[in-house]
Image (cartoon, helix red, strand yellow):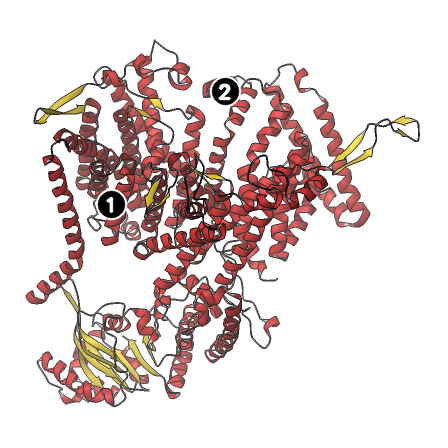
Amino acid sequence: MGISETYTRGRELAVERPFVLVVAAVLALLGFDVVRQLATPGGLSTARLATYLWDGLVVGLSIGLAGVGLSMTYSILNFANFGHGDYVTSGAFAGWAVTWLFAGAGQFDLSTLLFIGSLSTTDLGVSILSTPLAIVVGLVVAAAAAIVLSLAIDRVVYRPMRDQEGIALLIASIGVALALRYTIYIVFGQRTRGLTDAQSVPELALPVGGGQTLAIGGHEVTLVVVAATLMLGVHLLLQTTKLGKAMRAMADNEDLARVTGIPTERVVRFTWIIGGGLAGAGGFLIALERGAMNFQFGWVLLLLIFAAVILGGIGSIYGAMFGGVTMGLAQNLSLVWIPSEFSTVAAFGVMIFVLLFKPEGLFSGVTTA
Amino acid sequence: MSADAEPTADDAEDTAEVAAAAQGARDAAGHPLVVQDLRKTFGGITAVDGASFSVEEGSLTGLIGPNGAGKSTTFNCITGVHTPTSGSVTFRGNDITGMAPHQIARQGLVRTFQIARELPDMTVLENMMLAPQGQSGERLSHAILPGLRDGVVAEEEELLERAWQQLEFFEIDHLAEEYAGNLSGGQRKLLEMARALMTDPSMVLLDEPLAGVNPTLEEKLLDRIHELRERGNTFLFVEHDMDVIMDNCEHVIVMHQGRVLAEGTPEQVTSDERVVEAYLGGDV
Amino acid sequence: MSSPTETADASAATGAGDGREIPGWTPYRAWFRDQWAQGGAVAWGTALGHLFVGLVAFALVVGFDVGSLPIGGSLVWFVYLSLTVVVLYAATAPPAEPYVAWLDDRWMESDTDKLLIILGHVVAVFFLFAVALGLPFNGLAGALGSVFFFTAVYAMMVLALNLHWGYAGIFNIGIAGFMAVGVYVMAILSTPVDAGPTGVPGLGLPLPIGILGGVVAAAVVGLVAALPALRLRADYFAIVTVALSEIIRLSLNSRVLQEFTVAGVTTGTGGATGKTMPGNPIRLLFYESFDPGAGPALLGSVLFPVFEGLRVQLIPPNSFLVGVVPLPAFTLDLAVEPPVIVNWAYVAVLVGAVALFYVLLVRTGNSPFGRVLKAIREDEVVAKSLGKDTNRFKIVAFMFGCGLMGLGGILWQGSQGFANPNAFRPIITFYIWVALIIGGAGSNTGSVLGGALFAGLIWEGPVYVRRVVTNYVELGGTPGTFPAAVGPFVEGEVLPFLAYMLGNISALRFVLVGVILVALMQTRPEGLLGHRKEEAAAIPLGRPTERAGGEGGTPRPTRSRTGATARRG
């Protein structure tokens, strides 16, 4: 048997080799070019490369954080939720509203703070150092609001459709996305809303050699730390609790899970709670890092989130994180070669490229959620 | 035949070799389907482990074996659903090993499914009209361009005629305009066989055609198969129910643990000790 | 005379069978039914009498001057509004019943009847809008021209999408991208080499070649997408198509491709500012050139005066009835302005294009080719086991659909003289999907109906509702913020809220689209005409000898009523 097994493995490797080879070749070529550009005087500076890498990581983690929720609902409820991006927006707006109310209480009235839009971010000076409490409360409320919203929508829209196919649910979720997005538009208007004060954001200067420094924003650090913590939490939840096991079982085979007595409706509810909560928190963190948001930023982000989730393979939270970081890095590192207008194109290109060789995504089969 | 040629062979490798040697001679003597040393592994599990057999022209050959004997995998390797790990499948002198399912079907080797796979949202007639090979209207240009479409219409009229005849032969013509999804389990099996015959096959592979069919329809189905065989069609009949095979097939191949255990007439096979031990013993 | 009943259709449908018992309503209804059942003069007299009494009651209620109510725009006003609705409902619901029954009958007759019913109602609704707004005939013609323009372009796009989704089960949400490829390639090929100081030069090829090039390019992009992507799962494939459409849009948007030179030829996409499209040749039928101030050409010089002169003075000024009673002057004004005429001429071209799409796609569907597509949608393994090279069919169908989407895009976005990448955001793809789902995936007739309903009632309708309401109700200033609108509402003031919502009607329309999508997927996922028996064959499938007497089986349990009876025809 030993020989035939080795043979099989060799065969499987041979099938996968083109992909590995192509990727290795492309990465090597790009790496070589980066080194060449770094060596060229007046070319790419270390600081710029470091900035690209850091930005890529930050953007990637934020996409990944939002993506984990999408991946979970995707694998457990079996449909691609096009409303997820607008859960992100809703969470961000809820968090923003509470943060501003908190920071501006006593100085301005509600309407001035949230609706008129004449207030500048410098009037409040929100940042993680100057108003940490407001931001923590905002983060919690963002998650809570997105959870309540996703549960309510599940009750009204998706629960009556449980026995329908994934595509029907997908189309309904497009309807949810439209209704949510433009409800936010009607309530808050189409203006871009500032969240944090760019002046009062602390910045860290990290030396990267050659007398150059990499500037790291305090909100970026916040995002990375919170995102990493949340993801670790989800990992522990899924790996160690009974609920996590039930979720994994249901992602595997829903009918079987039902027959074996797993309370599927409860699992669905917790899926929305975790998925919605991560979406809301992710939305707020992204707004915090960017300093501003508008009614459709979640929708614009959604395609990248989808790309990340699919790249990683649906159902895998590691895949979602990995896919997110890949997207973020692809988007930012592409700036070394192509104009910034094409950075999103590059990210999508990477996704399509990977799917050509691995049609089920990179981490498919490694289901963790 | 090979089944009684080596009744007590201990070494399966020998069995395969002897069988393989026998194939060459048979091929010429009117054996359209020849399977040689077929092997299929999934990861570490070997589902088919060097099966060799052939099917005689115009025969109704049964392929039986207990559950897990490798019948279905063999079947799937022949029809192109799986690519064999090694070995070969030859149909009418052409090597069809590893060909795509549609290419194999085009050679005239058509299959039916264990659980009938009707096309539920299409009518019975649509199901039937789908099957014939080489329809000119399957090219988009012929379907839409004014001059070329006339030819398609003429062809369709011919096909419709044939479809009705076939439906009448299987006595399901009263269901012709029904959605296939509304048919009973047995009617679906009839439809599936009728549909397979619409392709004008030179050989039909039947994957448990009697599974889930009530006794009345079962009889009808078997009658049709016998009648078609008398008209010259060749059938390979996969079944795990021994009795059905023994009553209907003139030649039986018994598989066990991925290999051909015995081969011969029903009488020869039933009197084979290993078969009794491997199959009947376990079954009863 | 049917127009007043139109608005009652919806309310009659919702009012019936919801179990709310209003005292006296049921016997009253029964009485009306009896009267109607007698037929002839009694029936029509009763029905018309109802409408008349209703109109009088309506006029009496409206007679109360809104402004003279004690609290203008308060809850009292809201009560008054409800009263009006009740009066209208009571007057129109009973006569609407036989009308709806008649419509039901006609609906089953044929596809043409279905189309006529939908289009007729759209026209009637816009006629009511025009009357309510006091628009001249020219205004109505302009409004309808716009509605029909959108109906036609959506019908085309939905027909093409139906080939992908309804027939082959290919989940394409990158429609915008294929449209963009068609439009931009056409523009690049056919824009003159000398495009003036502001324009981006093109290759200066004749327009038909440009259009053909655009269609072929869209089909080729479809091939490029389909070759690798068709082995993906349906939802992965969907994401790839939408990503592709975004890649296309972002590339068109970029400064790099704004103007470039390849092999000595300079051309470009125009970048984010957009690109001037080749002139619409229809205009040349009416004008001597594309210049705004051009003089009329042959057709224009004949038609413009004819239509502008369509004013019939029915009652000249200073006339008297029987020489005694003074009469108001009245002129029947059917005059139509030149721009509206040109627009209608193009709409006519579009209707021809829809017909072409329809014929092509019906032929595609009703053929062995369509049969295989249908089989692939149902069970690809079966199609393969019957010797069908399913990948070939899927690729050909996908390319054909993409080519048609390119053509549809050219006729839509390419016909307006100007296009920019913003017109090809993914949202447009979803509109087309909504229209498809309204009509019902799988049905070509349904696709056209879905396009008409989407364009007329969801797309153009809300804007007119706003116009009508603002025309009749003194809304006062529109509140600037949401709380300023909601605050008074809680206290009983309705108008600020109404004004705010109407001010945001375009956003409200999106919410409406979303809610309709969800409601449709929950209650009627097969749409208006989906899942009905459109047999995929080039000839009617019946017993050749006694085809007329073909015994039909029992309908599928899941099939809609319209589907079940559609077979009668």
For label 1, the residue is A350
Q: Quadrant of residue B18?
A: bottom left
**SS at mark 2?**
helix
In which quadrant of the rendered image does the C terminus of chain C lie?
bottom right
**Nearer the camera: disc 2 or disc 1:** 1
Judging depth in this view, the residue of A180 and C30 nearest the camera is: A180
Count neighbours of disc 1 (C-alpha within 10 A) and say few if under 14, some if 14 to 19, many if 20 or more.
some
Question: How far across and down, in percent of the image, does residue C471 sit?
Answer: 63, 25
Tell me the CA gap for discs 2 and 1: 47 Å
Q: Say if B234 sits above or below C259 in the image.
A: below
* Amino acid on which the number 2 mark rests in the picture: Ala
**SS at mark 1?**
helix
Count neighbours of disc 2 (C-alpha within 10 A) and say few if under 14, some if 14 to 19, many if 20 or more.
many
Q: Chain of mark 1?
A: A
Residue C437 visible in the shown view: no
Question: How far across and down, in percent of the image, does residue B258 sit?
Answer: 17, 73
